[in-house]
Image (cartoon, rainbow, N blue to C red):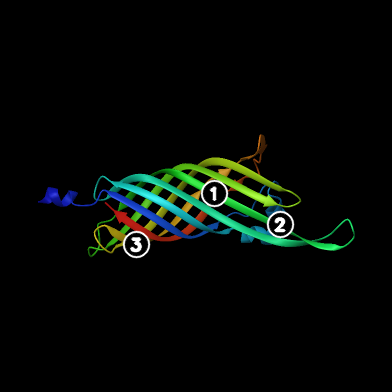
Amino acid sequence: MPIFAQNDFEKHNFSMNAGYAYKATDQHPQQFVNMFENEDHANLMKHGYEFEFDYDYRFHRLFSVGLKASMFGSVHGFDVTTIGVDGKEKEVYYSDDMNIFYVGPTFKVQLPTIANHWDIWARATAGYLNMRNTDKAAASATYSGDCFGWGLGLGVDYSISRYIGVGASFGLLGGTVSTLKMGEDEFDITGEDESLHRFNINLGLRIRL
């Protein structure tokens, strides 16, 4: 019976989450013209949405290994009044669209279930981060960059049934881009590195099989 009890749990856990993310950076490379020149716009670009997916293989009642994939998105724009060639004022819309993608393996520690319904856990991850930012100024430009990423997360899940649950989590995901690409061109931005560190709060669905 003790041996059976140690192995009487679902081994596959799928988590699908959505929520709010805050990108914690005050510095941008000069290639990101709108954020580099407009502090108010840059501050609004820190706020975004997040979608993430986690798969955990629970090889022990307390430990799991798995995979994380997530996406951060932020879009904001503003109008600028300029003087045209005809001497008349006109408004031009400037905007930024930033997306950050992450994928990497994970290790999860899960405390013993409380009252048959509540699970408290912590997850660590390290993997690949990719950033793409499209800004519209005098002309549109899309820059991308890659880097090593890492993350930590804490969460609590509530089991509705043996196989279905809901959960909430708080996480930190970070990385720093030091080289930007635009088409065939590369730009070394060492000293003006674009920090991809962000905090997120998510709610989501849990499926255990």
**29 or 70: nearer the eye?**
70
Upstream in sequence: badge 1 or badge 3 = 1
Say if residue 77 shows up in the picture: yes
Q: In the rendered image, which quarter is residue 92 located in?
A: bottom right
Is residue 132 found left or right of 150 in the rendered image?
right
Instruction: Name the residue located 65 percent from the left edge and 37 percent from the top edge.
Output: 183
Instruction: Name the residue located 62 percent from the left edge and 45 percent from the top edge.
Output: 193
Q: Residues within 10 Å of mark 3 (few under 14, many from 20)?
A: some
* Residue at disc 3, secondary structure: strand
- Check disc 3 and report the residue beneath it: 166
The location of residue 160, given as percent across then percent down, is 28, 64
What amino acid type should be assigned to the residue bearing mark 1?
Answer: Ile
Looking at the image, how many numbered discs can be counted on the residues? 3
What amino acid type should be assigned to the residue bearing mark 3?
Answer: Val
Q: Residues at badges 1 and 2 in contact (C-beta under 8 Å)?
A: no
Badge number at residue 94: 2
Say if residue 157 shows up in the picture: no
Q: Residues at badges 3 and 2 in contact (C-beta under 8 Å)?
A: no
